[in-house]
Image (cartoon, helix red, strand yellow):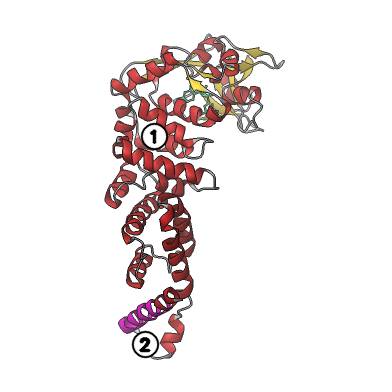
């Protein structure tokens, strides 16, 4: 058997980037031979094995054949006669379809190195269409490598456009789409991901509310602002959806199977953004602030609230900065209110809850007047 380093590791080495994962392809072996060498098989469907010591993935060379629409519509064929080239040919982009043998020699039947030097994202073959998720992957690589000057070549752009117009994206499981979106949000230039998808007509089936020009432009502007900071996934996602009304943001997040923290941050960011923008130049009243703080559950989740405030700095206009500072000052002022002290004064049950509310409101009103 021969073993080759493949995919992202070869690409990233040539780009001078840090290599995180090593994926290997094994040619000329059977599953039994791998097991006999101490490898452990992972997953029943794909012939992938874990190295007994390094735990890195070793896949038997394979080809895939499409039989129906969507991700489930193809079958895997793996046998000792499948060559390295067969295996590389079914991969998505030429820069991901290079291998390195055990002498460190590059094996590059689809000119990935040349495309890498020309800063081009190009599909390897028509087999690209086997998996519509590759549209999102390509957009993600564009988002990662755009700062290095990479662009999608016209042929691949046209192929992806055709796949989108044939409805291929509708067959993707939301969980797989979310995985790509979540990763895209952390790429070097995340806005490139969404801009490219929009150009391809792919945002309409994936995040329909964002496919209108105005909410997209607003969302991308907010996202680009977060980009400069060490933003978390929920902040970035909330920034992206910030131009949507609260209910729309929440429903979209649920439909996308975004995790609860992302859904909640998106809902709150939309709600707060709307309220701050409506507040006008006088800012918020103590009552309005109190209502917002309760909606954000700030008393139980102060760290989440700070994340929300940081997000709002990107989703609102410059004129809203004083209102954001007001919110922060209000929390500081009211967080000193102690249930214990009020209980010592004889409050309990429902009257305790009311007393806490009243006292917090008093503290906030005083803080606003200073
Ligand atoms: N691959 C593919 N089509 C997919 C998923 C993966 O062709 N839908 C191939 C590509 O050759 C890719 C390799 O499998 O390089 C490994 O995939 P993965 O680990 O997901 O991506 P990487 O290229 O390593 O990229 P990243 O840096 O984002 O992990």
Q: For the magenta stretch, what is the residue range?
A: 349-364
Question: Within 10 angstroms of label 2, few (less than 14), some, or many (20 or more) residues?
Answer: some
- Which residue in the protein does label 1 denote? 177
Left or right position of 340 against 162: right
Residue 75 visible in the displayed image: no
Who is closer to the viewer here, 243 or 27? 243
Image spot of residue 73 (x, y percent): 34, 21
Image spot of residue 361 (x, y percent): 37, 77
Label 2's element? loop
Image spot of residue 82 (x, y percent): 52, 10
Label 1's element? helix
Up-down relation of residue 298 to residue 161 (above or below) = below
Q: Residue at x 35, y 82 (%)?
A: 355
Quarter occupied by the N terminus: top right
Question: Within 10 angstroms of label 1, few (less than 14), some, or many (20 or more) residues?
Answer: some
Q: Residue at x 50, y 22 (%)?
A: 151
Up-down relation of residue 30 to residue 338 (above or below) = above
- Which residue in the protein does label 2 denote? 347
Up-down relation of residue 249 to residue 98 (above or below) = below
**CA separation, marks 2 and 1?**
51 Å
Who is closer to the viewer here, 121 or 367? 367
The residue furthest front is 281
Would you identify the image quadrant in which residue 279 lies? bottom left
Who is closer to the viewer here, 288 or 111? 288
Magenta part, dominant SS: helix
Q: Residue at x 31, y 44 (%)?
A: 252
Up-down relation of residue 205 to residue 318 (above or below) = above
Whether label 2 touches label 1, CB < 8 Å:
no
């Amino acid at each position: 058997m021969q073993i080759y380093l493949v995919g992202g590791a070869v690409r990233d080495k040539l780009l001078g980037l840090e290599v995180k994962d090593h994926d290997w392809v094994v040619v000329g072996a059977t599953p039994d031979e791998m097991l006999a060498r101490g490898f452990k098989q992972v997953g029943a469907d794909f012939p992938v094995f874990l190295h007994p010591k390094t735990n890195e993935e070793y896949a038997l060379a394979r080809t895939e054949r499409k039989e129906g629409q969507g991700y489930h519509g193809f079958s895997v064929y793996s046998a000792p006669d499948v060559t390295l080239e067969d295996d590389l040919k079914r991969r998505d982009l030429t820069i991901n379809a290079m291998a390195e043998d055990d002498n460190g020699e590059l094996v590059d039947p689809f000119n990935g190195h040349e495309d890498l030097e020309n800063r081009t994202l190009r599909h390897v073959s028509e087999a690209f269409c086997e998996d519509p998720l590759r549209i999102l992957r390509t957009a993600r690589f564009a988002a990662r490598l755009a700062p290095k000057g990479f662009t999608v070549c016209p042929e691949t752009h046209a192929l992806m456009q055709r796949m989108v117009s044939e409805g291929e994206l509708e067959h993707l499981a939301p969980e797989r789409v979310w995985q790509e979106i979540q990763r895209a949000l952390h790429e070097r230039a995340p806005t490139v991901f969404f801009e490219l998808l929009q150009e391809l007509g792919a945002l309409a089936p994936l995040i329909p509310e964002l496919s209108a020009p105005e909410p997209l432009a607003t969302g991308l502007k907010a996202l680009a602002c977060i980009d400069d900071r060490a933003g978390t996934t929920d902040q970035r996602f909330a920034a992206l959806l910030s131009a949507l009304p609260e209910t729309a943001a929440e429903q979209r997040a649920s439909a996308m199977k975004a995790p609860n923290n992302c859904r909640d941050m998106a809902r709150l960011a939309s709600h707060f953004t709307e309220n701050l923008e409506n507040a006008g130049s006088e800012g918020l009243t103590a009552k309005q602030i109190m209502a917002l703080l309760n909606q954000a559950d700030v008393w139980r989740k102060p760290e989440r609230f700070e994340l929300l405030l940081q997000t709002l700095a990107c989703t609102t206009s410059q004129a809203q900065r004083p209102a954001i500072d007001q919110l922060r000052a209000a929390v500081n002022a009211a967080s000193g209110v102690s249930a214990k002290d009020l209980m010592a004064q004889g409050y309990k049950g429902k009257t305790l809850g009311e007393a806490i509310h009243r006292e917090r409101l008093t503290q906030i009103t005083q803080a606003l007047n200073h």
